[in-house]
Image (tube, rainbow, N blue to C red):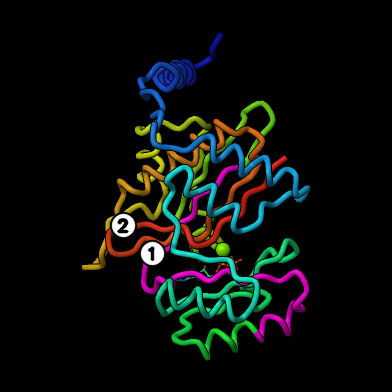
Amino acid sequence: CYSFPTTAAKALGALYRYSKTRTRDIGKPIDFPNVDKKKAEIIISQAQKDGKPYMSADRVYELLAAYKIPVAAWWLANDVHEAANAAESIGYPVVIKAESSSIVHKSDLGGVAINLKNAAEVKSAVEKMEGIFGAKNLKFLVQKFLPGGKELIAGVSTKPGLGHLVMFGLGGIYVEVLKDVVFKIAPVTELEAKEMLSSIKATKLLDGVRGEKGVNKEKVIDIIQRVSKLVTDFPMITEMDMNPIIAINDNVYVVDARIKIC
Ligand code: ADP
Ligand code: MG
């Protein structure tokens, strides 16, 4: 019972919008026949045996690759010689990141060295990290350096009653300062993934402003759906954080990822 017609009309309008949201056709999630579910299963069960909440970097990147989520060329090196060899085969310039289960925000602690151009720079970066973190149990993720791209972020969290939430936004300051990210409940369909790209506030930056090159949206939309498929297939993944995903020259690569399992 409404005292004024305006309130009644507003309530009717809200009901109409709600029913449109509930009944609209968002399509079906894509099944992605080319994902390697068997391999992913093996990686996850090995990670569970490790008994640590966060998966090690090599398992993380192998898992992403099994679901055809593009990652920057990488190698996990045990020592300085392996790191130099890996850098040689990946091709300079490279990035080196300190890898150990106790290191979370690597760059804050001096665990990320970018734009290393030769073996001498690799050696000094490795030695510096051994000085900071101690050589015991420390490994080095050697990765292709991808300068000048746009940084994006995607991830997954879980909420009781909702299951997995897939998140997307622009990386760097956009996520830290402006919190410009959007969420969808998994499984995410192609239409929903497209809407995620268009519903962030800085969506225009994805197209490129003032002559700047835009990002390959198709590839980003594909990644979002594959991440959604991965966590839907493996509900024991409780958290994923891919920050940044670098969009560069019409390609998109994950360069930093963390996955939590239970
Ligand atoms: P963390 O988030 O643990 O501090 P990241 O791996 O995200 O470590 O690296 C920190 C920053 O370094 C990234 O946000 C990005 O700006 C830059 N960076 C990392 N890896 C690369 C890479 N392969 N190419 C270019 N820039 C990179
Ligand atoms: Mg990061």
In which quadrant of the rendered view does residue 231 lie? top right
Position of residue 171 in the picture relative to residue 25 (left or right): right
In which quadrant of the rendered view does residue 156 lie? top right
Q: Residue at label 2?
A: 215
What range of the chain is rendered magenta? 127-156
Report helix, strand or loop for mark 1: strand
Image spot of residue 257 (x, y percent): 56, 56
Q: What's under tag 2, amino acid-wise? A: Val
Asked if the residues shown at circle 1 and circle 2 are in contact, with their CB atoms under 8 angstroms apart, the answer is yes
Q: Residue at label 1?
A: 150
Label 2 neighbour load within 10 Å: few <14, some 14-19, many 20+ = many
Q: What's under tag 1, amino acid-wise? A: Lys
**At 39% from the left edge and 31% from the top edge, which residue is drawn?**
33
Which of 166/204 is in front? Answer: 166
Up-down relation of residue 160 to residue 182 (above or below): above
Q: Is residue 134 magenta?
A: yes
